[in-house]
Amino acid sequence: MLSRINTLTFNGLETLDVDLQIQISSGLPNFIIVGLPDKAVAESKERVRSALQSLGIQLPAKRIVINMAPADLLKEGSHFDLPIALAVLSVMKIIPSENLKSYLALGELGLDGSILPVNGILPAAMHAKTKNLGLICPQACGSEAVWSGLKDIIAAPGLLELINHFKGTYTISFPQIQAQAQTTSVLDMSDVKGQESAKRALEVAAAGGHNLLMVGPPGSGKSMLAARLPGILPPLSAEEALQTSMIHSIAGELKDGQLCFNRPFRTPHHSASTPALVGGGRKAKPGEISLAHNGVLFLDELPEFNRSTLEALRQPLENGCISISRVNSHTTYPASFQLVAAMNPCRCGHLGTPELECPRAPLCAAEYQSKISGPLLDRIDIHIEVPAVSPWDLASAKRGETSDIIRKRVIKARNIQAERLKSLGENQICTNSGLKGKLLEQVAILDNDAEKLLITFADKNKLSARAYHRTLRLARTIADLQNESKILKLHVAEALSYRRKLSSNGK
């Protein structure tokens, strides 16, 4: 007796077909799983046996062999429980095998026969749709699968309901989409007292998708400003929300089957390891930079991060993706994020304030700032100083602009960029921060005074080619905020003011 069912395995965001075959033959009673299974898959036979026993179904006293083809592809995860159980039920004629041929199945089994939620349902449903297959999944994951647009989804609470559904004695209703999460931020820019120049830099960064570094003493509001950046960014488009949700689904962070149209805001602690930040580990899981895809990655206390961990950010900052190489596989995750970093000017944090700075200043500042390499700083478009807030600003009842007002200007500038790039036939790049090569030359047109200022500054301050082009992109964004078609001298001047080097003397 031979039967088979469709399932899949994951390699990063990539979904790979697995043809699960089962054969029951004469011989000593045994239950064998082959096809390069990991520990979780090898243990499936015990969960399947117990789940079936809870329904009063005994496995035949014969030799049962489960083969997962292709046999040289590593199979990982507990989501193979359900397809194995369905294959067994099919070969035992409890469920007609014809009913299962048009479905792809995944789910974990409880010992009582319940079907438990698993990660990766959204990409699995999208894969099933491309293969013209239906999907059998846990009931708890049904609302997540619906976002794929798949019309044939069986989200079952348990094996018993699934058996009765295929026998026609019970109907499993089609899952419903859960209400999406709120798209407005509760953190408002008007809560920030003072820091007008920092707010302006944050607006420019949001408009062009530029990376930002804030340097200032403790308590000056760096973290407060960073936390309000998502509130002035435009909401995710449907395509961006789907991309981001697929990553969160693989990582098991998609809550209640909801697609959230808020921009991700990830704040890893400075003790985070390199695999935690960029992805990796035994199963090459997505890291913080991938979970921040289409959103913001905030690194507070930047110099406190491990040096090698920070250096690992250099490639994804340039390419918008991260490749994780292992002996058995190579996995690529998208990592198009906006980096926002904050740091104190020195270890004590009070460089330039004689009453508070430590006795080792300014030597301690040079040592502290040297933890961040030049190549990494070169990839950060905007460097700003965030001074301590004066008591007069703190006591003032005057409130600044709200996030809604700033967001409207940001969206307007981004629409200008999108229309310009669309007219040039470019559909992959969304913001000025992604402009490169000939496309940057076409878009960033300088008037004579602006060009002279930029060349003079770059020559005097020995700007690298990367820093030169990043300044050009920044000036293009500033011009877009003012709805100017050509980059003027004042736009370049503001962009150059954001290229300040870290100070070691507090000035």
Image: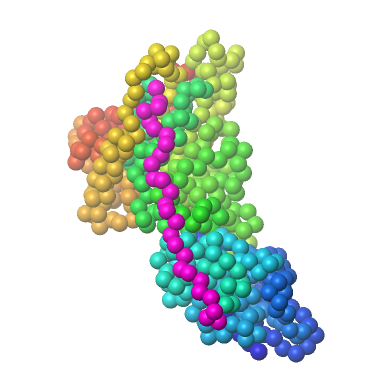
Vertical side of 5 occupied by 220: above or below: above
In the current view of this chain or complex, which residue is farthest to the front? 169
Above or below, 111 relative to 203: below
Is residue 128 part of the magenta span, yes or no? no
Instruction: Indicate how the structure is coloured in the image.
Output: rainbow
Q: Nearer the viewer, residue 90 or 379?
A: 90
Q: Position of residue 108 (x, y in %)?
A: 62, 66
**Magenta region, mostly helix, strand or loop?**
loop
Question: Which quarter shows the N terminus?
Answer: bottom right
Q: Residue at x 78, y 83 (%)?
A: 29
Badge count:
0
Q: Where in the figure is residue 71, as x and y percent of width and height? A: 63, 76
Taking the image as shown, residue 258 lies to the left or right of residue 287, namely left
**In magenta segment, residue 170:** yes
Nearer the observer, 477 or 441 = 477
Where 314 sits versus 214, above or below?
below
> In the image, is 203 to the left or to the right of 113?
left
Which residue corresponds to the image point at 51% horizontal and 18% vertical from the top-left?
351
Q: Residue at x 34, y 44 (%)?
A: 234
Based on the displayed image, in which of its 4 quarters is residue 359 positioned? top right
Q: Is residue 489 left or right of residue 145?
A: left
Q: Residue 254: percent from the left, percent from the top?
A: 51, 54
State the residue lying farthest toward the right: 28
The reply to whether residue 38 is visible in this rendering is no
- The answer to whether residue 395 shows anywhere in this view is yes
Residue at screen point 53% across, 9% down: 355
Give percent across and percent down for residue 507: 44, 18
Q: Which residues are magenta?
A: 166-193
